[in-house]
Amino acid sequence: MNQYYVYIMSSHHGTLYIGMTNDLYRRTYEHRHKLVPGFTQKYNVTKLVYYEETSSVESAITREKQIIRMAQKQEGRVGGIVESVLGGLGRGLV
């Protein structure tokens, strides 16, 4: 059974990155060590603050888009976004 992850990473300044992957360890390692050029490298986004796991790539993509919409409404506030995503459940908080 395949596993997919939707995750939120943050910089020390609160810049957020929301993504999805099938290998959370590898992907966070790439972000932390700036192995892939792009947004997370440019804004020094290195801290994993939240993740969810699912067995469907379609549901991971849907959830990623949902979290991105929440982030846009919260204007990028880490605490507010994670609180909205958690909905009081406390799962996946890193």
Image: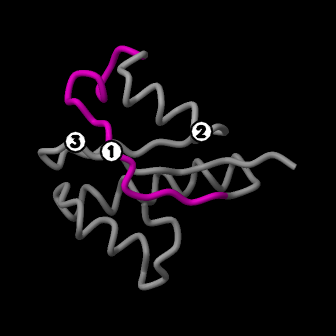
Give the residue pinned by disc 1. Answer: 47
Secondary structure of the residue carrying numbered label 1: strand
Secondary structure of the residue carrying numbered label 3: loop
Give the residue pinned by disc 3. Answer: 11
User: Mark 3 or mark 2, which has the lower sequence index?
Assistant: 3
The magenta-colored residue range is 36-53
Q: Are marks 3 and 1 in contact (CB under 8 Å)?
A: yes
> Rounded to the nearest whole Å, what is the CA distance between mark 2 and mark 1?
16 Å
User: x, y (%) of residue 5?
Assistant: 60, 49
User: x, y (%) of residue 88?
Assistant: 42, 85
Q: Label 1: how many residues lie within 10 Å, few (<14), some (14-19) or many (20+)?
A: some
Give the residue pinned by disc 2. Answer: 21
> Rounded to the nearest whole Å, what is the CA distance between mark 3 and mark 2?
19 Å
Left or right relative to 42: residue 54: right
**What amino acid is found at the position of numbered circle 2 in the picture?**
Thr
On screen, 81 above or below 19? below
**Quadrant in the picture for residue 31:** top left
